[in-house]
Image (cartoon, rainbow, N blue to C red):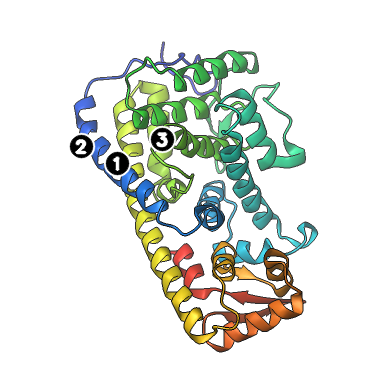
Amino acid sequence: MSFDATYPFPLPELPPKLDSGQKTLVKWLLKARTELGELKGYSHALPNPGLLLSPSILRESVASSGIENINTTVEKVLEQQLFPESEQRIENKEVLRYRDAVLYGFTGMRKLPIGNRLILGIHKELLAENSHGYRKTQNRIENSSTGKVLYTPPSSGEISKLIANWESYIHNQADETDPLIKCAISHYQFEAIHPFGDGNGRTGRILMVLYLVQEGLLSFPMIYISGYINKHRSEYYRLLNEVTSKGKWTEFIEYMLKGFYLQAKETKEVLLKIIALHQAMKEGIKQKCPAIYSSDLVEQLFAMPIITPVRLGTLLGIHYTTATRHLKQLEQKGFLVNQQVGKYQLYINKSLVELLRS
């Protein structure tokens, strides 16, 4: 039966019948595995991976939200996370929710496997009061300019069965398919199920990175995969459509393997620069500001590259006036840049912000 975008798609359950040409995937599979292995290794060289995780995820959050035309910058989000939610602009609020959803999923995996409960929890973090669980009505994807229907997902009555099948597939240890190939396949399947009224793309990209953690390919969800999809957005949607309409799996899987390879390589390079910057700042502060130096202080300047005296005081357990003196001294010695934004006095680790922006 030929594909008709205006009718609910009869999505086949997993595993799929892969088309021929899989041998072409081996090169990209090996390259991706090598880079992911190095990224995983270097992530353990960080002095405190947990503290540095948030700015790394923020970079991914900005890119992933950009795919949904929620446009802002890393610097703006780092600024606005310091403000009360009522003062945050909507696009920055959306990005911060994405970051919180990734962290929710990452910590939740310690107690729950990736599956129904975690998916719903991630979506709740993403959309807050606008999250109403799986959709109860039919939805469809349309061209925003022409209104042409591009894809109609399976009916709402099929969602529970398809999610259960998706969950079974990603946890099937007897299946010897390489986890990176399974990651690409399961990503397509989730987007094709399109289980929510909104937030399907962002939820799907979070699940993809968490799956790499589940399979031991990463220790932390810090790969910048949305940056790749954003750069090659039209190709991403074209290849998703070709899996649906023509069953052409190989090209889509190859696209994703290239993405894992390129983004693991880029994330690793940024990580190495962050490690070098951290070491240089640590030594510099120890030398030029010995009276205020502590490893905790340096780590907080990396965990929160834009910070206020009040926030630093809270994090270090010191009075905000003491925190102000510390930050002013670090500014005078060239480690930080000071900026007034409304009523807030911000101190910026400019070198780190530029790395996260790249």
Q: Secondary structure at mark 3?
A: loop
Residue 257, quarter of the rendered image:
top left
Residue drawn where x is 72% and y is 79% of the image = 322
Residue type at the position of mark 3: Gly
Residue placed under numbered mark 3 in the picture: 216
Q: Residues within 10 Å of mark 2 (few under 14, many from 20)?
A: few
Mark nearer the N terminus (2 vs 3): 2
Closer to the eye: label 2 or 3: 3
Residue 261 is at least partly visible in this image: no
Residue 235 position within the rendered picture, expressed as x and y whole percent measured from the top left: 37, 41
Residue drawn where x is 74% and y is 30% of the image = 132
Q: Which mark is residue 32?
A: 1
Q: Is residue 129 shown left or right of residue 189?
A: right
Residue drawn where x is 69% and y is 72% of the image = 308
Q: Is residue 73 above or below residue 104?
A: below
Residue type at the position of mark 1: Ala
Residue placed under numbered mark 2 in the picture: 27
Q: Are marks 2 and 3 in contact (CB under 8 Å)?
A: no
- Observer-nearest residue: 242 or 279? 279
State how far apart marks 3 and 1 are (Cα). Answer: 14 Å
Residue type at the position of mark 2: Lys
Q: Residues within 10 Å of mark 1 (few under 14, many from 20)?
A: many
Q: Is residue 271 above or below residue 244?
A: below
Residue 255 is at least partly visible in this image: yes
Q: Residue furthest right?
A: 86
Mark nearer the N terminus (2 vs 1): 2
Residue 237 position within the rendered picture, expressed as x and y whole percent measured from the top left: 43, 37
